[in-house]
Amino acid sequence: MHWLPSLLILPYTFFLLKTYRSLLHVGTFNISADPATFVSIVVACRNEQKNLPALLNSIALQNYPEYLFEVIIVNDRSTDNTFEIAAGFTGISNIHTLNNKGEGKKHALRTGIKSAKGNLIITTDADCRMGKNWIRTIAAFYEKNTPDMIICPVQLESVPGFYGKFQELEFMSLQGITAGSAFSKEATMCNGANLAFTREAYFNHSGNLHDEINSGDDIFLLHSIKKENGSKILWLESPDTLVTTASSSTFRSFVKQRGRWISKGKAYKDNHTIVLGIVTFVTISILMACLFASLIYPDLIWVFILMLILKSVPDFLILQNTCRRYSKRNLMRWFLPAQLIYPFYVLSVAFYSLIFRENRNINSPFPKEI
């Protein structure tokens, strides 16, 4: 009878094996013809004077005609020299610096997109870096497939030590689920650090972004577009579109950031995302309950081991596939210790999300989202 709780892990195993199956069919996109789409790159910035020059240099080195793209930097009430650095950058001929007409990242993006000349919008963050074929590949993919939204890959910069590897593995698992779910036409997640969409799609759905919540400019847009009949949301698999973003500097900031991500889940309306979140939380809760119960009833340790295996097998398959596609196979050596710590991490994040107030205080700045 005490083996019955292990059955509650099976929905999690099913969901992730289904995702893994989709990942097996993900193929690399190759450019067949030079694109000619005009692209608007929009970056919302708050106090990014340290990061912004490197991003602008990455964009300045793009292998795409300068007359076919513009860069719009939207200053979100920075107290440093973010605006001055963007306004004074001379490496990009078509760069515009604006001040946010509201407050917060969602308003900043809205300000930038309203002034954009291109129908294809690409968003990224000030702490991101990309290769020289980034714009060219996204534009070519758009011309070939004409989607409403293109979800592009993101990876964390490598940081030495277990904490850094744990972050990378956790982020890789999110990227695996993002790619797999999008490829199976059940897009669940995306990342505004590397996201493209049409101007028309944005303004058709910008009223559903939950401005009362600080974060979620990307996820809420995704879910709103997904609900529209006939909409097309695609994953773009290409090393040329891979963007690298900064890791969290401390474990506290890491947990706080993930807590903010979870806390906006109360506003989600997408059934697939809601079910996946519930299944994941139930799985982790049962695992932890069984582990603590085994301290009183030692025989339960075997139930815990069985449940851990049922959870770990699909986790391993998705991570192995994603690490291979991102040329990060060496991360898999950290899989086992990370897997043992992961349930404690999830409960810590869940606890933080319960006490974190996501509603915006209009008079005070809030942390930047990756």
Image: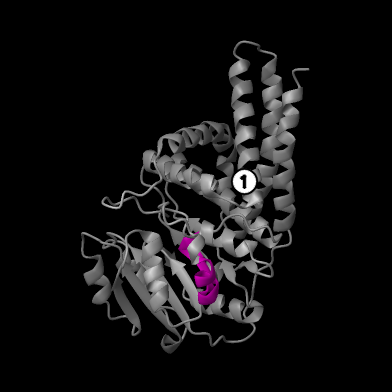
Give the x, y percent position of residue 42.
41, 71
Please provide the residue range marked out in magenta.
191-205
Towards the viewer: 157 or 295: 295
Q: With respect to residue 238, does 256 lie above or below?
A: above
Q: Quadrant of residue 35?
A: bottom right
Establish if 339 lies above or below 210: above
Magenta-highlighted stretch: main secondary structure? helix
Q: Is residue 201 magenta?
A: yes
46 and 49: which is toward the camera: 46
The residue wearing badge 1 is 274
CA neighbours of label 1 inside 10 A, class few (<14), some (14 to 19), many (20+): some
In this view, the residue farthest toward the top is 296
Q: Is residue 232 magenta?
A: no
- Is 283 rendered above or below residue 140? above
List the single residue furthest toward the front. Answer: 207
Residue positioned 51% across, 60% down in the render: 208
- The image's colour scheme reads one colour
Q: Residue at x 49, y 64 (%)?
A: 207
Image position, residue 369 (x, y; %)? 40, 54
Image quadrant of residue 89?
A: bottom left
Give the residue displayed 39% in from the left and 41% down from the top: 357
Of residues 264 and 43, the one nearer the viewer is 264
Q: Quadrant of the C terminus?
A: bottom left
Q: Is residue 109 above or below residue 341?
A: below
Residue at the image point whose x is 67% and y is 31% from the top: 308
Asked whether the viewer can see residue 165, the reply is no
Question: What's the residue type where badge 1 is placed?
Answer: Ile
Q: Quadrant of residue 87?
A: bottom left
Q: In x, y percent, where is residue 141?
A: 61, 76
